[in-house]
Image: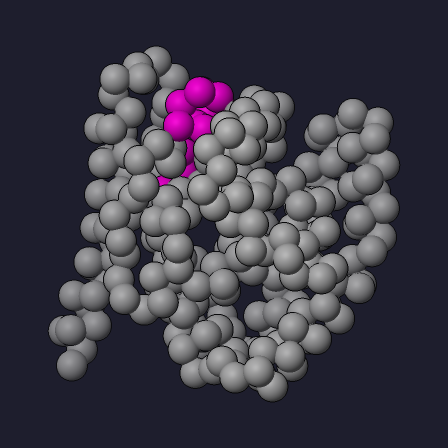
């Protein structure tokens, strides 16, 4: 993406955040009052406004399939990560849940957006700072126990159309420690729609919600096997979609 397109994109995204200022005030009031359920609801409403607004503007459509009856309470969504478009994609595809994102601190450097992404209970990880990572993950565990949901991309970086990479070790530990369900998600198309052409273009992004994977009673020694299972679930759907595409050729 060239500098001019990046500037245009950034300017538009900032303007889309202005209409949800009412949500910001209500989120802050609920947080100040310790009203977790009310805060979660206002975050959900803000996300239901912002993500679809972007998709409508650029004529991008989410094709959502899979398990719609999500578990009550906090869950950890685990997804492959194609590009920046995955953030509004989740807001379009999962309107029934509040969620923040476990993301690298690069997002915290974007004016206005940085405050909003943190306000919806996202966690910013500083690259190479192990002590800070422990603090952030402890905060995440507390949030999950209190009913907030989070989205994590265990590859650790955007695939940019190169295919799903291996999960980083320890990426699902949040769910294990908080004893909340893991909801695997497979996505395909956000890179093509939002970044591949240098500027967002119309298209369809596929989003498949897999049945929740329980973590209650899973021992720490089984963490590796659980991560491999979740990674396999997500990858199998991507392989299925790739086979469908090959068969159409």
Residue at 49% over, 80% down: 1
Q: Position of residue 114 (x, y in %)?
A: 67, 54
Please give the name of the residue rendered at 72% of the width and 51% of the height, measured from the top-left corner.
Answer: 115
Query: Looking at the image, which is closer to me, 133 or 123?
Result: 133
Relative to residue 175, is residue 191 depicted above or below? below
Q: Is residue 248 magenta?
A: no
- Name the side, left or right, on which 48 lies relative to 206: right
Tell me which segment is drawn in magenta. Answer: 173-185
Quadrant in the picture for residue 54: bottom right
| Image position, residue 126 (x, y; %) | 53, 44
Which of the image's four quarters has the C terminus?
Answer: bottom left
Q: Residue 172 versus residue 74: which sits nearer the camera?
A: 172
Residue 113 falls in image quadrant = bottom right
- The answer, for residue 2, to whether it is visible in the render is yes
Question: Does residue 70 show up?
Answer: no
Query: What residue do we see at 83% from left, 30% from top?
Result: 32
**Between residues 214 and 70, which one lies in front from this camera angle?**
214
Q: Residue at x 26, y 62 (%)?
A: 163
The picture places residue 220, in percent across and down from the top left corner, at 31, 17
Residue 48, horizontal then vertical, whole percent: 65, 55
Residue 129, compared with residue 179, is above or below; it is below
């Amino acid at each position: 993406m060239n500098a001019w397109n990046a500037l245009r994109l950034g300017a538009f995204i900032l303007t889309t955040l202005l209409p949800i200022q009412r949500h910001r005030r209500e989120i802050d009031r609920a947080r100040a009052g310790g009203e977790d359920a009310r805060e979660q609801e206002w975050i959900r409403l803000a996300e239901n406004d912002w993500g679809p607004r972007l998709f409508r503007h650029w004529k991008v459509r989410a094709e959502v399939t899979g398990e719609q009856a999500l578990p009550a309470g906090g869950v950890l969504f685990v997804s492959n990560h194609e590009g920046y478009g995955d953030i509004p994609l989740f807001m379009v595809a999962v309107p029934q849940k509040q969620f923040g994102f476990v993301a690298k601190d690069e997002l915290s450097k974007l004016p206005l957006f940085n405050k909003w992404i943190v306000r919806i209970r996202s966690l910013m990880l500083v690259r190479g700072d192990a002590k800070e990572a422990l603090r952030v993950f402890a905060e995440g565990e507390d949030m999950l126990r209190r009913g907030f949901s989070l989205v994590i991309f265990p590859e650790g970086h955007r695939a940019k159309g190169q295919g799903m990479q291996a999960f980083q070790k320890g990426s699902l530990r949040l769910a294990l420690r908080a004893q909340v369900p893991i909801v695997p998600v497979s996505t395909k198309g956000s890179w093509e729609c939002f970044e591949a052409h240098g500027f967002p273009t119309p298209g369809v992004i596929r989003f498949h919600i897999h049945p929740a994977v329980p973590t209650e009673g899973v021992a720490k020694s089984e963490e590796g096997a659980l991560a491999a299972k979740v990674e396999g679930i997500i990858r199998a759907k991507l392989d299925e979609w790739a086979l469908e595409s090959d068969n159409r050729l």
